Amino acid sequence: MLLMLAVSLGVSAEETNPYKKFQEGLPFKMDEVRAPQIPDRTVSLDRFGADNTGQKICTAAFNQAMEDLTSRGGGHLVVPRGVWLTGPIVLRSNIDLHLEKGAIIQFVADEALYPLVTTSFEGLDTRRCQSPISGINLENVSITGEGVIDGNGQYWRPLKKGKVNDGMWKKLTSQPGGVMKRPDYWVPSESYNQGEQLSSMNVPDKPLSLEEWKSIKRFLRPVMISLVGCKNVLLQGVIFQNSPAWNIHPLMCENIIIDQVLARNPAYAQNGDALDLESCKNALIVNSRFDAGDDGICIKSGKDKDGRQRGRPCENVVVDGCTVFAGHGGFVVGSEMSGGVRNISVKGCQFVGTDVGLRFKSTRGRGGVVENIFIDGVSMTDIATYALTFNMYYGGKSVAEVLADSTAQQKPDTVPVTEETPIFRNIDIRNVICHNAGYAMEFNGLPEMPIDSIFLKDIFIFSKEDAIFENCKNITKENVQILLERDLEKKESNKKPRRR
């Protein structure tokens, strides 16, 4: 890494910052983001008796190596080539977890190794199983290298038959202990089944006793990478895959860089978001790839009352040079945005085969303000539904599911504006090219709080259906072109010579 080289040559971090270029010319003020300074000290995991064949659990070795480095002020914990089977890894300040090429960290499929912890999920204060990799209130922490971190997500996740072929359905539902709730829906255990009965979404709807929490433990599947309240964070180069729930979840972190990572989940992964950046400040997401079973790059800040009480917006974020493959959305804001979202720049990105390209979503009850979003230079192809959507009636379903269910699109009458009313305003979108979308654009605001002040410039969309504008105001359009598939077919048909 450039930073490691600078340290070894005696060059101070103040004299070189390869990430400074991503903050040049921003339309908002933002503190300079720098990579964490990790002491120039290295230990190898295999020094602590770890087994690299995947036959022996290495949890103790990871913990001992972390303790050894911590006792000496930090450094780099190197994971050599091999398969390292382990339970949860707890990160420490001033330590870089570095995976060499050919290194695979795979987490054990055993819920007993993941104790219940108090945390936040989907924007709500709750309990979940401990994340495979976690860190709380750390400074100067990183995960770097060329290896793979695998969360063994198929052990935790439910499965919908419509998302897989017959062979995959048979394979995944043959796991012992699973429950076929319906002919088309399978969950991994009776404990999971009981958890769903207590929850309308993924968090129990009522207070539970400790015994009740324990009884639904398998349902409380964790995010894979949980970083809470950390400062000076770097994720670089590593492949993060197959998470139990969300993949990468920085929460209330500051000065964070995500660079050249690949975050991926199977397309059938329930709640398999690639990246959820929540209530963070001063973040760079650059030159990375995302391939998800849910949203790709998602900006959040808490849900409903819990998010408003936290009062921590997600702000000062740069997304630059990223690619999103499968996913419910390429770049997404919400739906949990109750603490606010502001000062976001998205530039030079490409979305290939996502359900939606640019997705803004919320609903009554959230509150919060989303503003000062700047999107410039996005290319998209094969977008299943909308190239761009603002929808203030989010109900937990993907856009494709909503379009297939007419009852899900019903809109209530106007209600009074309160602190629970979400606000979306001052959003600048320019230089967007989308080839082959189902729909061009959707603006679907609340009648009591229309989407306000959206600037669209140099937009070209080739789609099957046209744009929809409802409950929005101050929409400025300059050189916005929408070419409909039927119009092109008609034009081509008129070109054909007629027989005489």
Image (cartoon, helix red, strand yellow):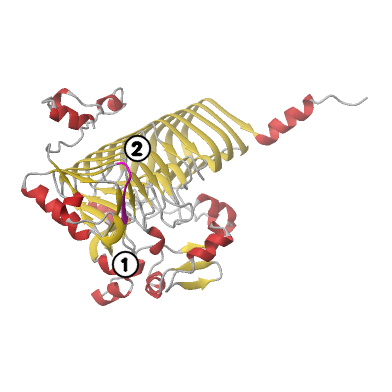
- Circles 2 and 1: CB atoms closer than 8 Å: no
Check disc 2 and give the amino acid type.
Answer: Glu
SS state under label 1: loop
* Residue 390 on image: x %, y %: 46, 43
Residue 388 placement (x, y as % from top left) = 49, 39
Determine the image quadrant of residue 189: bottom left
Q: State left or right for residue 500 relative to residue 37.
A: right
Residue found at the very far right of the displayed protein: 500
Q: Residue at x 64, y 34 (%)?
A: 484
In primary-sequence order, the first of circles 2 and 1 is: 1
Residue 465 visible somewhere in the drawing: no
Give whichever of 221, 318 is nearer the camera. 221
369 in relation to 213, above or below: above
Query: Quick check: is 425 in the magenta stretch?
Result: no
Quarter of the image with the C terminus in it: top right
- Foreground: 471 or 72? 72
Residue 282 horizontal/vertical position (percent): 24, 36
**Cα separation between marks 2 and 1:** 43 Å
> Crowdedness of circle 1 by 10 Å Cα count: few (<14), some, many (20+)?
few
Residue 144 image position (x, y, % from top left): 26, 41
User: Which residue is under mark 1?
Assistant: 110
| In the depicted structure, whether residue 134 falls above or below residue 340 | below
Name which residue type carries label 1.
Asp
Of tags 2 and 1, which is closer to the observer? 1
Q: Which residue is labeled 2 in the image?
A: 371
Q: Residues within 10 Å of mark 2 (few under 14, many from 20)?
A: many
Q: Main secondary structure of the magenta part?
A: strand
Q: Which residues are magenta?
A: 101-106
